[in-house]
Amino acid sequence: MKTRLIILSILSSVLIIGCGGSSSSGRGSSGGNPPPPAEMPLTRFDMANGCYAIQSTQTEKFVAASDGIYNANAASIGAGDAFFMQPANLGKYLFYTEDRKLLTAAGGSVNAQDLATDAAIWTVDIASGGDSFTIVSDGSSQALQVNDNGALVVAESANSPASQFKFVPTSNCSSYPEMPTSVSGQTFKGNGVDKPIVGFADVHTHMGMSSEMSYAGDVGPSAGGVLYGEVIHRFGVDHALEDCEDFHGPMGIRDGNNVLSMNPTDTHETKGWPSFVDWPRRDYLTHQVMYYKWVERAYLSGLRLMVNHGTNIAALCNVGKVLAASPEADCNDMSVAVKQVEYLYDVQDYVDAQSGGPGKGWYRIVKSPQEAREVINDGKMAVVLGVEVAQIFDCGVTILLGNIEQRKCDQAQIDSEIQRLWDLGVRHVYPFHDIDSSLGGAGIFSGDVINVLNFLDTGSFWKTTTCRDYPVDEPSVRTPGTEMTTAIPGTGSDPLTQALLDATGGVTPLYPPGKRCNARTVTDLGEYALRALMQRGMVIDIDHAAYHSKDIMLDIADEQTPAYPLASSHDAHGGLTSDQVVRMLKNGGTVYPYKGNGIKHKEFLEKLKFWRAKAGISNNDQILGLGYGADANGFGGHPGPRGGDSEPVQYPITLFSGDDWGPQFANFSPVTVDMLVIPESGKYWHIDETGMSHYGLVADFVEEVRLEGGKEALDALYNSAEGYVQMWERAYNRNGN
């Protein structure tokens, strides 16, 4: 038990300072009865979220249930059953009945079931002739047929011919359960692909972090199985965000977040959809906060660019999988990051499926700044793929006694891994993250727990040095260094502590008093990797590099012609001081903070204006844009309410209309943001009460920004997607990309 408590303490402490189930048996309906579609479907994707009667071309009659048996014998649409067509993926559907069951293949027959299973997923395809469709069981590849008596049956084999059906618009469907967005009105499109982007940017988040990293459910979890919940699910929200007991144990006793209550054996109510008694919450970092409908709510409010990073820290993941009792979980940094990035393509397909077909969704992965401009001008959200892992390019390092390094990569491997990421669509890279590597040192911001993880990954605790001087009378993104403590977390009486003591011979590091910085900086391999990334035109993030390494990165950037822009996306762990920020801005880089509430956004805007003035940058030279890095799903925490003295957020919120909304919004229709309420349970989230409990509260954050900073702050926020794209263009367009 002591070992488990120590593991809990390590993991949970990291979660506080870090970074960057059972089936439901009943079904409700969000949104009531949907209106009938206007037209007959022409493609296999057109039925998405529509209400249809199913007509057999063989009998020319409609499908209806009688005593639990489905027959195509109903003489009229009105006599036939109405099915809500819920996309499970592109061209694949759940047929949701009026009494909230699912049409399911059961042996050779077809019936309606309460529980969603793979046998309830049907692939729809256009039949020969083009005016009707075939329906095939996704699980068995057996076609739906109408037998001689008109009954629906499943073909005896995958080679048996399929019957053909038409989907005829009707009414009286029950809507499939789904998380509402509580946003009404048409979100805006751009003013032209050659005009500045209007919209804001989240430049650091982790939508690939999920308790299952694939649509099919066969890849496994991120974070060693600690984080519960999925971004998408083929069976919908009541499976993506259902009870977390299978992951976190009865009443959450295995949840790594428990020490937030100052008790490693604390508990929480595990119920998810639709009641959400205890989670999601801004300080429950081990529950999904980026369900796609929450992200859609933010998009509808003006989020137009999101950088999504595949992420992992192997040592933390290995601790996590012990805690989560998932010993089979993959913890290799690059392997997990690549799976997360690949999962984001699944997310894109799923959003497309909900929107009526390939390319029709609001979530669009882009691979160049020009693609980003085109997507955003079309009124959709550009998704930039990134990677933030401790052992980037599998370039870990083992440091032996005498400071002898055993490097785990070379230049050829770096080139190969950069090419692999490029081919995958990755365009934003962290060369350093939390743990030392063959490329150099990580920024120190935790003097104990992360140091233990560094030891577990590299065999060595951090070597530190005095942090160089910086302008103390000027604002910093983050002041450098941290107080170092002993790196052994326990008393020596528990197995984990004893193992660490044995590995070090009982000698623990001693650090001088005061703030210390990492003595390890950019290595020769690190310099090679940085130049190779610049040659590729990648966005390079300076965050998480050791404080002194940031100087070296800026020196290398200055050597390029023209100077290379660098990005800081979430408060620069390890330190980022005024002199460094000014150099970054002069080179056309971007500095966006860790996401706070509206007060913090206004405060950082004042810092940014100071740095720009010192760098001699006017709004005519570079657009004044201020986005954020939410680090959602990244174990970094989320902002709380602004406090009792702040002007309250009042619902409904009206966006793009009023005195604080400038001329760039003049042609946009107003959008109304209501408080997010789940009709099935009455569960609601008010940002003044909960802060950012999940990503859907970003829409409410916009109103915080308006209340705290008025027109200037709104302008800077909605200029931030343009600011990021301009920085990306300076990097991308120099080498013939």
Image (spheres, rainbow, N blue to C red):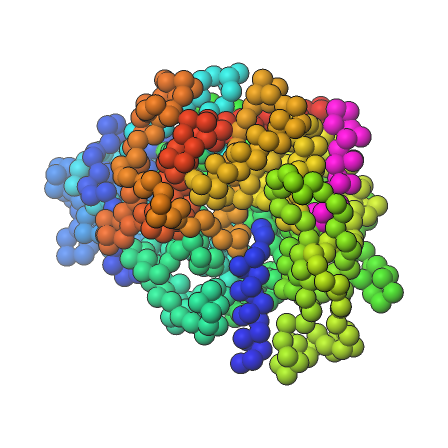
Residues 334 and 44: in front is: 334
Quadrant housing residue 77: top left
**Image: 655 above or below 215:** above
Direction front: furthest residue: 473
Front residue (pair 666, 407): 666
Query: Where does the image place residue 148, in percent across and percent down from the top left?
Result: 22, 47
Tell whether 191 sits left or right of 690. Answer: right
Q: Residue at x 43, y 32 (%)?
A: 709
Asked whether the viewer can see residue 644, the reply is yes
Residue that appears at 38% across and 48% down: 643
Look at the image and say whether residue 560 sits in the magenta stretch: yes
In the image, residue 45 lies at what x, y percent?
37, 35
> Is residue 274 in the magenta section?
no
Seen in the image, is 555 located left or right of residue 696? right
**Residue appearing at x 70%, y 36% in the figure:** 579
User: Picture coordinates of residue 594 (x, y %)?
Assistant: 54, 44
The mark total stands at 0
